[in-house]
Structure formats: structure tokens, C-alpha cells
Amino acid sequence: MCRLFAVTSDTPLSPMKALEALDAMREGHDGSGVGLFMRDLGGPFAAIKGAPILSGIFTDAGLKKLDTLMMDIGFMTKYRMGIQLPETPPAGTPSRDIYLIRAYDYPRAWENLAEEEKHRRLLKVRLELREMGEADGDMIVFSFWPDVIMIKEIGDPLTVGRYMDLDRHGITARIIMAQGRQNTNYAINLYACHPFFLEGFATMTNGENTAFIPVKEFLESRGFDGYIGFQSDSEVFVHILHYISTFLDLPLDAYKHIITPLPDEALNSHPDASVLRILKQSCRRLIIDGPNCIIGNLPDGTLFMGQDSKKLRPGIVGGKPGIWAFSSEVCGLDTVIPDRDKSKDFQPMHLDMAMVGPDRKEVKVCRQTDRLSRQA
Amino acid sequence: MSANGQIIPSSLSISDLPWQIRWNQDKCTLCGSCTAVCPVNSIELGVFRKREIKAGTGFAEKPSSSQTIRYGIRQRTSPAYACVGCAMCSLVCPNDAIAPVRNDGSDKLRYHINQGGQPKSRGGRRNDPSGLLDQIKFIRISMLTDPALDAGRHTFDVNTLLGRVLEPRDALKHQREHGWMPPVREIYPLVIGGMSFGALSPTMWEGLQMGVAYLNEEMGMPVRICTGEGGCPPRLLRSRFLKYVILQIASGYFGWDEIIHAIPEMKEDPCAIEIKYGQGAKPGDGGLLMWHKVNKLIAAIRGVPERVSLPSPPTHQTQYSIEESVAKMIQSMSMAWGFRVPVYPKISATSTSLAVLNNLTRNPYAAGLAIDGEDGGTGAAYNVSMNHMGHPIASNLRDCYLNLVKVGKQNEIPLFAGGGVGKNGNLAANAAALIMMGASGVQTGKYIMQAAAGCLGSEQDRCNICNIGLCPKGIASQDPRIYRRLDAEKVAERVVDLYLAFDMELRKILAPLGRSTSLPIGMSDALGINDYHAAERLGIRYVV
Ligand code: SF4
Ligand code: SF4
């Protein structure tokens, strides 16, 4: 089973911190892979917040293809971070040519476009690159978004982190999500490795989402370019989050109502019963059904954790003003924030969602029996 | 028959019949129970005369002959009286002296059951015991990655929706703007399919209704029952139990007057209205309630004269095309109840199912689609229709579901599948397979008759005389001497039993698949079949 760790902190942290937390929880994962999502970056990227950053893995040939395409569109490299790798990778990790983390200036022609339109186009570029790379196997693109870096690799998380010497490269971030282990039900594929990312939204999950096929079929039929991939049965969580935020304009607390609607008896006495019943019926195809703990991140920086309605997966939130962590096991939390008030640790139950906003002052818990924070 | 009787082409011997009666002279006490109960008068008391000749071995004795007479049971062989194998005679025999035995050769009767130029008609069974649904296995089992659920301990939400479900954005918009929301019912996914009052006996109908009411009110299971064409008893129409009933209107419009007249006095809306265009067992053919069953009560409820056969036309004759018909009928039925009741058509699975479905997707009032495959139907029809017409349900349903997926409307128009669900007793497995292929729920009639009332019929053409009003169990007869055999209370008990058992089996299927919070509609990745072509056709996994 996968191990999850996410942290949001006022001071930028090294991703190695998160990998250490995963290592503390290693009994639960087999060290078969790692995924890292970083946002609100420190270090050299802090000064160029608005510039889109491309992260992925390339062969030399792939890099050439990338450069030609980006040049054609008009993207200029603004900042590049090269990750130099030792000659031999650790056992089980394939040897790669280039890990690319590169910030760009928007093309001239895009300058006067609305933010939204720019974002749409970034998505298109990412998808195009991914498709080209899938054809020849020379490019793997994880994200192309301002202020976001993603790294995924096969192998033991801590070993991979040390091999890539993430500390030395000066990558730091205020929000980090990390997951240990490759995907479960499908063939090994880096795209199937958590966290998943789409237009500013990211999620990661442990467990198995048995409602995968119906959810996937629903999303695919929405006619939105970004709903692709589906190499993992939980990739749909980020798509659902994206769908309800952008298509339905619903607040984050509605997410829980969509994926795990209240039973009818509870619904009847709910202050928002009428709208919730409509959501339950019309979004029935998005109901998830696995033992899952979901940790996610919104474009505004809010970090959250929720459970499926069976609550068979552990998940804990704790910390102190300025730094909060979300972990699948308490030992992960202990590794990164040992000096917190442990009596205030919170384990979301099947109706709860815990969130920490961009101000990082407190953990907010909303229960599904509460009023919605905002109506659609 | 005496030895010098006339032999005609249709003279059959007992061994020409599909069922033969084995009668044991030593055990029989000639009580007459079997002959009294035989629904088709296939056996009668017979007088057997025996002449014995004694030829002595010595010279002194003269040869002599003597006559003895004994009484016993004789099986009649004329086609009209051929034994149907129901085994009622065995059931009533106090001495185990009689039993029907299936002829293991091929019978000759089949060539002679068209006397008077009338082809054979019978009660609804396709008489093909095999079926694809029974071949499907559930293969996605959560083992190590996740703790499997426990069917006994975890809670399961298996209810489904009947009614037009709006696309999420439209739904929110309608809600915001206080627009019209199509009525949606949350129901149990196993629906008792349309079997009409008239086709079924009053005791059977009452038993089913009582069972359904008990399931709803005592067990908290929102089970629904469809009336079939033929109306609904006036008292039920005006009772609070109407909400558990789906009223059917078919092309004969039988019983609709009664329903329309009751609308102002209805305390509750019916669950839904089903417009029947086709029945799986006899696609392209209408209903057929034969005169035997049209007694005073049935005639009154249906608004017809007594003792006339009531064939429904194959199509709704007042309308010009299926498009027009579906649109108009859905509209006017919705209107009759103030757009508060879901209205949907039921069609037989055919190559044109997709056309009807596509038509429905553009009709905002269409509340769903029921598709009935070739193994469905309980009513009377001609042998040839039942045995040789129709489309199996699995691929038809799958095509329809995938078509909806393609246009992004899956489950917006819920599909209800019927036709052979549980025909070999595997009700929950068959239902679950159809649901995972895309059905929002299933309809079944035959299994209910079999389980709740002990229908004797089988897929090997046993009994199957539902059409002529002689149902030996009293399920499908309108003759009080026969239907009094059936205790409505006991039927109700069995309905409850079978639903509770079904529910447990369904959970036993869903739990290992890790599904508990919503019905696994379209969870096709859980299905496997060991037939390559079937797997390809259905878009499920091929497993050997
Ligand atoms: S099996 Fe049925 S039809 Fe045949 S003789 Fe016995 S009672 Fe009559
Ligand atoms: S319903 Fe009656 S007549 Fe029909 S098959 Fe069953 S037992 Fe026979």
C-alpha cells in the first residue's frame, strides 16, 4: 500500500524532508517508486513565480525535440536547473539522460491573453509533449505550470532522493506532496505514479478505487482534453476535483459530497438537502468506492485530506501555526514536526475533510453534516 | 383405445409423447386424487380387461380362458390432452404411485400440436436452458492491496435511480433557477417485471403486492413491482401502496380507463409509468390474454366483455412512428400526473434498440429505458415467437450503455435490463453481471413466479400452460377452484424471503469487489468470460 506525506510550511523545505517521512513509514511500502509535487517554490524559482515550469524526464533526442517545439511556439528559457546524476543509478532505478526542470517566459504572442487562456494553452502544450513522448518513448512530462515542480522515479524514495541529490540542487518548496510506491493495479509506468496534476490541482491517494471504470468513462465523455491518462485507478481523483471546481464551480467542501455522498437519512436533515440531493443524483457516476485516503492541493495553495466513506485507510493531520503536515501514518508526521502538540493531531473520519489554507494558521475541519461553505 | 380403433395420422402412442406417466399398480389405491388434479386431463381412470388362456399340459385338462377386470390409471395420448409433465399428480398422490417421466427420445407430439391449423401457443419460456449470463464471472477481487469488505458487517448502499437524471451542470442550473426537475425515484435495483392482473391470478397478484409492501415498510427495501398491461385493482389505485407500483400501459390500453378515472382520488403517485412497446419473449408481437382467463373480474378491470380473447396489437396503433409514439405518450403520461411521475418505455431487445435510445436522449421527459431480452416474458405467445425470435439481452444492453457513454449520458437515462435474469436460479449473479455491464437495475418476472409461487414450468417445456387458465399451481389461472390452491400470504412470505436472499447474495458479490457505497453500474472491469468472442463483443475481459 502506498504511503503519503504532504507538508505546507511558511519556510520553504527541502523535498528530502518529505522523503525522510516516507522512509519512516517504509514498512507499508515496498520502495518501488516515488512521486514528488512541489509548489510555492523557494530558492531560485522564488523570484519567477509567474513563469511556467516544465518538469519531466528526457532522453537527449527528446530534449532536441522539446527545444524545437518550444522554440516554434515562442517559449524562451528563463531558468534551467540541471540535475547531474552519478554514473550508476541505484539498483532498480533506470538510468536517465536528463531530469528537466526549466522555467520559461511566455511567448510574445501570449502576452495579452487572459490568465485562463494562458493556462488552457499550457495544458495543450503539456499534452502535446506527452503524446509526442509516448510515441517515441523519449519524453515524459509531468507538469507545465507556474510555480510547480514534479519529479517521479522508480526505486526506493530516499535512495532516489539521495541519488538525485535533491538537497544540493537547492530545490525547496512551501508545499510538498510525496508518495512512496508505484501504482498498484496496472503495469509500471511513471505516469501512473502519484501525485497527479491537472491545471493547478494535485491529488495523491493510497488504496484502490473500485469505481474507477465508471468514473473514468464519465470523465472521458466530458469532452475536456485534460481528462486523459487513467493509468492508475486513482488518477480520477484529481480530475474529479478539477471537474467540480472548474465545470461546476463548487467549493472544496462539496468535493467530499460528490465522491462520498451522505446516506439518504442524513441527507434529509441536512440544511442544504435540496442541492445536495441534486448533486448526489447527477454526480452519482463520480461516487468513489475504495478504501482511500486522499490528499490534495488547490491552485490557491490549500492542502486537504479526506477519506472515502468506508474509512478503511489511515490518515492524520498535525502541526503548528506555520507548518502543518498530512500523513498516512503518525510516524511520518513525527519525523517532520516532532515538536507539535500531539494532542491536537486530527484523524479525519468518514465524514470529515481537513484543510489548511494558504495562511497556514490552523487546520480547518468540515464535516459533511455542516452547511456548505458556498453554494454553487 | 381398443385394438381395432381407427389409426389416423395424429394417433400417438405413449412413447411419442414428451412426458410419460409411470403408474404403479401395487401402490395405487385408486383414490382418484391424481386424475382430479391433472390440469390437462391427461390421465383418467381406466378399465383394463385381461383375458387369460390356460392350456393344460396333460391330456385330461381342456384349455380354458378366463376374463379379469382391473381398474387403473390410463394416460391419454391425443395431442390436446398430452401430459405436460407438471407432476401435480405426484404431488397429490398419497401413495407415491404415479409420476411423469421425460421421454428421452425425441417426441412425435411436436408435429401434431397444431390441430385445427392453430400453431402451438404457450406460457413464456424460451425452452433453452443455456445462457450467456451464467458464463460471466466476477474477476476483480480486492485481495492484498485492500482489506476486502464483509458482506455481513459493512453497510451497503445498493439502491438505484429510476428517472431522468440531469447532467450536473444542468441540474445545478435548474436548481438555482427553480426550474423543473425531472422526478427521480430511488428504488431497489431488482424490479418485479410486468405481469398483469389477468395473466396472474388474484391470489398471486395479492401475494406479490403484499410481499412488496412488507419489504418496503418493514424491511426498508424500496422494491417496486410493475403491473403489466391490464390495469390495476381500483382499491390498490386509491391506496398508499400505489407508490410501490409501476403502472404499465401497452398497445391494447387494457385497464387504462380505470387508472385514468382513479387519478383524482389517488392518495399517492405511482412509482412510474412504463409504456410497453415490446416484450423480449415475443418481439414484434403484442400481448395475448386468451378467453379462458377473461372472467367477470378481469373483464371489469380491463373494461372489456367477458370471455373474449384480448390480443394487444404489436404496436401502439394510434401513432405514426416510434419517434412520435414515444414522444407523445411520454409527454401525455407525464402530463396526467403533473410531471411528477417518471415515464419510460419498455422495448424488446432488438437491432433497433439503439434507435429508440437515441430518440430518448433528446426527449427531456424520458425517464429511462427498459430493455427486455429474448429470455424474458411470462405471457402467452406462439411457440415460434418464443423459441426463435428476439435478441439476447447482454450485448443489446451493452451496446446501449456504451452508446450512452459515447455521448456522455450514461445513467442520465437509466437502463433497466430484463430477459433471462435468474432463469437458471442464479438471480443475483445474473443481475450483478447486467448491472456491471451498464444496467441501472434489472427486471424479472419468471424467477419470481418460480420462487414465490412454485411455478412448475421449466426451460425444457415442462408445464408452460400459463396461457389456458389451467395453471396447476393457481399462479396463472382465473378459475377460483384452481387459484384457491395458492395462498397469497405464503406468496408474500416467499417474495420477502427471495428478496432478502438476493440482497445477501448481491452483497456477497459486491463485497470482495470492494464495492459498497454505490451500485457498480458499468463496472465492466470486474467481469470476465471464457468465450473470446463474447468477451470482445461485450468489451469485458477474456479469461480462461
Ligand atoms: S404430470 Fe401433470 S399433466 Fe401429467 S398426468 Fe400428472 S398432473 Fe397430469
Ligand atoms: S405458471 Fe402454472 S401453468 Fe404456467 S408454467 Fe407455472 S405452474 Fe405451469
Image (tube, rainbow, N blue to C red):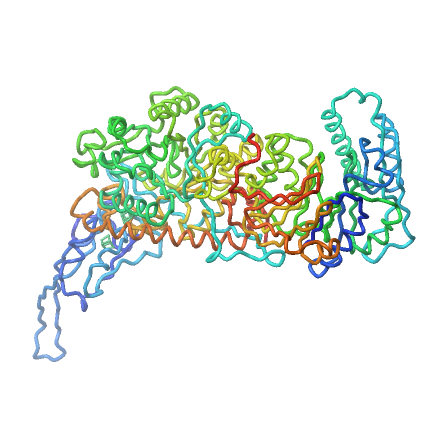
- Name above or below for residue A274 compared with residue B74: above
Q: Is residue B15 left or right of residue B542?
A: left
- Name above or below for residue B41 compared with residue A109: below
Residue A322 image-quadrant placement = top right
Q: In the image shown, does A260 or A316 lie closer to the viewer?
A: A316
x and y percentages locating residue B346 in the rendered image:
40, 33
Q: Is residue B377 left or right of residue B23?
A: right
Q: In the image shown, does B58 or A24 lie closer to the viewer?
A: A24
x and y percentages locating residue B152 in the rendered image:
46, 58
Q: Write the residue at 74% across / 30% down.
A: A124
x and y percentages locating residue B68 in the rendered image:
9, 66
The image quadrant where one finds the C terminus of chain B is bottom right
Q: In the image shown, does B254 or A149 lie closer to the viewer?
A: A149
- Inspect this view and state whether residue B462 appears: no
Label total for image: 0
Q: Is residue A23 left or right of residue B293?
A: right
Q: Write the residue at 45% across / 34% down.
A: B350
Q: Write the residue at 29% across / 58% down.
A: B101
Q: In the image shown, does B540 or A332 lie closer to the viewer?
A: A332
- Inspect this view and state whether residue A287 appears: yes
x and y percentages locating residue A162 in the rendered image:
85, 54
